[in-house]
Image (tube, rainbow, N blue to C red):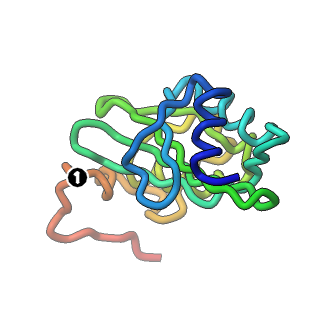
């Protein structure tokens, strides 16, 4: 299936997805946060597509809002797709896709820890990059004011 065929198939069969021309290498579609998990389940279970591989989830702070971007692939069909979710800058939150792709575990923890995006229904939302008692904000946010000196706890 070519990119154009994939785009046409998605536009015909997934009305919850909106095509975005900003994808540089792979097709990029936008989905509303509340439709993310169901859409991902459909993409994984669609026998024609079989998006069974999660390559990455990244967070983005645009200063106006937050984004989560999911890079997924179908290994057997040699297809790749990016899905973007736009979240409000105040109290950003999203549901976990860990039930769809278990590999989401660490990516979602990183987004929660570094961007402060709340991840609902995640089974182990704990820190792994910053100290457990970290209380100095979210370092990947553009408005984060890094202290002149960060004191890490001594062991």
Q: Is residue 67 above or below residue 53?
A: above
Name the residue nearer the viewer: 147 or 9.
Answer: 9
Q: Residue at x 81, y 38 (%)?
A: 45
Q: Residue at x 65, y 47 (%)?
A: 124
Give residue 137's position: percent from left, percent from top. Answer: 30, 50
Q: Quadrant of residue 92?
A: top left
Q: Residue furthest bottom?
A: 155
Name the residue nearer the viewer: 1 or 33.
Answer: 1
Q: Quadrant of residue 133?
A: bottom left
Q: Residue at x 76, y 42 (%)?
A: 44
Q: Residues within 10 Å of mark 1 (few under 14, many from 20)?
A: few
Give residue 37's position: percent from left, percent from top. Answer: 65, 32
* Residue 132 shown left or right of residue 55 in the figure: left
Q: Residue furthest right?
A: 47
Q: Is residue 11 above or below residue 69?
A: above
Give residue 88's position: percent from left, percent from top. Answer: 34, 30
Q: Residue at x 57, y 47 (%)?
A: 4
Provide the secondary structure element on which disc 1 rests: loop
Which residue bears the numbered disc 1? 142
User: Total label count?
Assistant: 1
* Residue 64 shown left or right of residue 41 in the figure: left
Give residue 7's position: percent from left, percent from top. Answer: 58, 41
């Amino acid at each position: 299936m070519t990119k154009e065929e994939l785009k046409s198939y998605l536009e015909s069969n997934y009305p919850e997805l909106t095509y975005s021309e900003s994808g540089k290498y792979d097709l990029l579609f936008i989905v509303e946060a509340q439709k993310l998990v169901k859409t991902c389940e459909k993409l994984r279970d669609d026998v024609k597509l079989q998006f069974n591989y999660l390559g990455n989830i990244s967070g983005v702070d645009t200063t106006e809002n937050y984004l989560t971007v999911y890079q997924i692939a179908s290994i057997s069909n040699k297809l790749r797709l990016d899905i973007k979710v736009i979240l409000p800058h105040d109290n950003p939150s999203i549901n976990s896709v860990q039930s769809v792709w278990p590999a989401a575990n660490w990516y979602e923890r990183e987004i929660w820890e570094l961007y402060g995006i709340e991840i609902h229904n995640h089974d182990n939302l704990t820190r792994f990059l910053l100290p457990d008692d970290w209380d100095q904000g979210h370092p990947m946010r553009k408005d984060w004011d890094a202290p002149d000196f960060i004191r890490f706890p001594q062991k």
